[in-house]
Image: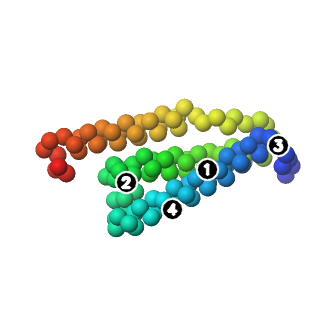
């Protein structure tokens, strides 16, 4: 295995990976404190469709975890292929996040409608 620790692409990917990992840890700690303060069970609290108050944070945590996976895959590719790698997020990731937010907004509108069981 021939790994160049000074490879700028690999260094950039790993720096981003550890920054995202730290953000995930901080967000997880924040969400867990909020969950415990609210006295909610894990399932209902971490469901962005039922916990609209924290939906953005919950979706952000999923987005960050997906980014961590993508970054590790990029690093593995860089190590195994020793080719330049593209570190820009894919359109699919952005589209997926936007679709999730749109679905949450639609659910929130449905729940706010008169006659909804949660009213």
Report if the CB atoms under discs 3 and 1 are less than 8 Å apart. Answer: no
Foreground label between 3 and 1: 1
Disc 3 or 1, which lies upstream in sequence? 3
Q: Secondary structure at mark 1?
A: helix
Report if the CB atoms under discs 4 and 2 are less than 8 Å apart. Answer: no
The percent position of residue 114, horizontal first and vertical second, equals: 14, 41
Foreground label between 4 and 2: 4
Q: Secondary structure at mark 2?
A: loop
Question: Which residue, given by chain and number where applicable, does mark 2 sit on?
Answer: 47
Where is residue 100, by image quadrant?
top left
**What's the distance in space between the residues labelled 3 and 1, CA to CA?**
20 Å
Looking at this view, name the residue that lies furthest to the left: 115
Disc 2 or 3, which lies upstream in sequence? 3
Query: For mark 1, does the 10 Å Cα neighbourhood hold few (<14), some (14 to 19), or many (20 or more) residues?
Result: some
Question: Which residue, given by chain and number where applicable, does mark 4 sit on?
Answer: 29
Foreground label between 3 and 4: 4
Disc 1 or 4, which lies upstream in sequence? 1
Disc 3 or 4, which lies upstream in sequence? 3
Disc 2 or 1, which lies upstream in sequence? 1
């Amino acid at each position: 295995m021939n790994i160049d620790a000074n490879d700028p692409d690999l260094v950039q990917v790993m720096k981003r990976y550890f920054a995202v990992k730290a953000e995930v840890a901080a967000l997880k700690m924040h969400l867990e404190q909020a969950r415990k303060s609210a006295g909610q069970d894990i399932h209902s609290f971490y469901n962005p469709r039922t916990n609209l108050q924290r939906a953005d944070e919950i979706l952000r945590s999923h987005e960050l975890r997906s980014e961590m996976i993508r970054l590790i895959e990029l690093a593995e590719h860089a190590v195994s292929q020793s080719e330049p790698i593209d570190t820009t997020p894919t359109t699919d990731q952005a589209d997926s996040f936007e679709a999730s937010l749109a679905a949450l907004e639609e659910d929130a509108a449905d729940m706010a409608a008169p006659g909804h069981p949660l009213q």
